[in-house]
Amino acid sequence: MNDTTKTTVAVIGGGMVSKTHLLAIADLSDTLQLGGVYSRSLQSRNALTAEAEAICGAPCKVYDSIDAICADETIDFAIVLTPPNARMDITQKLAAAGKAILMEKPVERTSEAAEQIVQTCEEAGVTLGIVFQHRVRAASEKLTDLIAHGSLGKLVLAEASVPWWRDQSYYDEPGRGTYARDGGGVLISQAIHTMDLLLSLTGPVSEVMAMAHTTPLHQMESEDYVTASLRFANGAAGSLMASTAHFPGDAESITLHFEKAVAHLQSGVLRLDWRDGRAEEFGETATTGGGADPMAFTHAWHQDIIDDFAKTLQEDRDPLVTGRTALEVHRLIEAIVTSSTEKRAIALTS
């Protein structure tokens, strides 16, 4: 029986990240409860149900359709974990039923489709949040605060690197790394987290020149290696390297060169090298899933995102990352791919 004093959530989708969300929900049990789960195939549904019951320590309600979730008046919001190509219909039904939605990245496979999902939720008046958990690391929050207060001076250069590794078995899963299911490769599936955090720290990109490539290390449809030169709207220059071909894989990093200091984010730690000779560190070292095991990271960051989203419904405010905010990184990804395909610089407009 549901506790009416708690926010109630339904989990939709039984992919590899579902365990992370269930662990986060279990750790939020003082204020949040799992209302039930749903996945399209019976096999996936049964596996998700068993996992939910083992983690949450109680019988779990199983829905046989999205319509059943929509009709359940006890559900306050749904967490959508499906592949990107399954998002549109689910979002339209949930939004029409007035259910708030917290969605794993990406919003959809293309900027146009992502924009449609965002508009659907806005027109229905339902809250849409996107899971970009890198923003809630302590080191990321510290750097965000320093930038907001102008402590570091003007941004001059920005560098982002995602030297990850995925073995071929990862891409052997049907649909993974395809445009039809995922919308692309390393950019939209892996580097999108680092790119979103980068944009939250630097502001928007105004122009890109890029190369996307598929190495012989993977048999896949989309890209596993990307390099891009970036020019930011504030005048700073920058670069991006993203890969799932860097064996054995290393942690992603962001390095920002300011007038007063250089800020380096990696593995949950912020290092500040001040130009007057001082050096400081903030945060704690943590794994981020950059190696062969894509799930080698803590669920604590997802817990913070879910907790924030639940509180938005009570406090009538925007979540940490809205659907509309997430469109910025989608547009950047699309511009990078277009630049590589057309072999020219691409200007971005908001």
Image (cartoon, grey):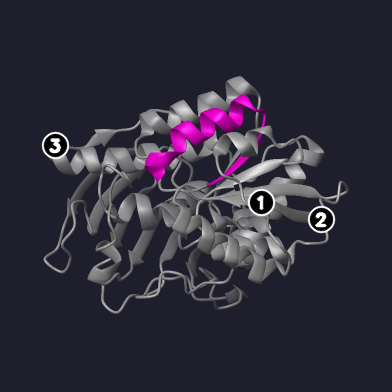
Amino acid type at mark 3: Glu
Give the mark, 2 or 1, whose residue is nearer the N terminus: 2
Give the mark, 1 or 3, whose residue is nearer the N terminus: 1
Give the mark, 2 or 3, whose residue is nearer the N terminus: 2
For image coordinates 30% across by 39% down, the residue present is 334
Regarding residue 235, the answer to whether it shows in the image is no
Point out the stretch of residues depicted in magenta.
84-103
x, y percentage for residue 37? 61, 52
Q: Which mark is residue 317?
A: none
Gap in Å between the C-alphas at discs 2 and 1? Answer: 16 Å
Q: Residues within 10 Å of mark 1 (few under 14, many from 20)?
A: many
SS class, disc 1: strand
SS class, disc 3: helix
* Main secondary structure found in the magenta portion: helix
Q: Are marks 2 and 1 in contact (CB under 8 Å)?
A: no
Q: Within the magenta stretch, is there residue 126?
A: no
Kindly identify which residue carries mark 2: 31
Gap in Å between the C-alphas at discs 1 and 3? Answer: 46 Å
Kindly identify which residue carries mark 3: 342
Q: Residues within 10 Å of mark 2 (few under 14, many from 20)?
A: some
Amino acid type at mark 2: Thr
Amino acid type at mark 1: Gly
x, y percentage for residue 282? 62, 73
SS class, disc 2: loop
x, y percentage for residue 228? 26, 51
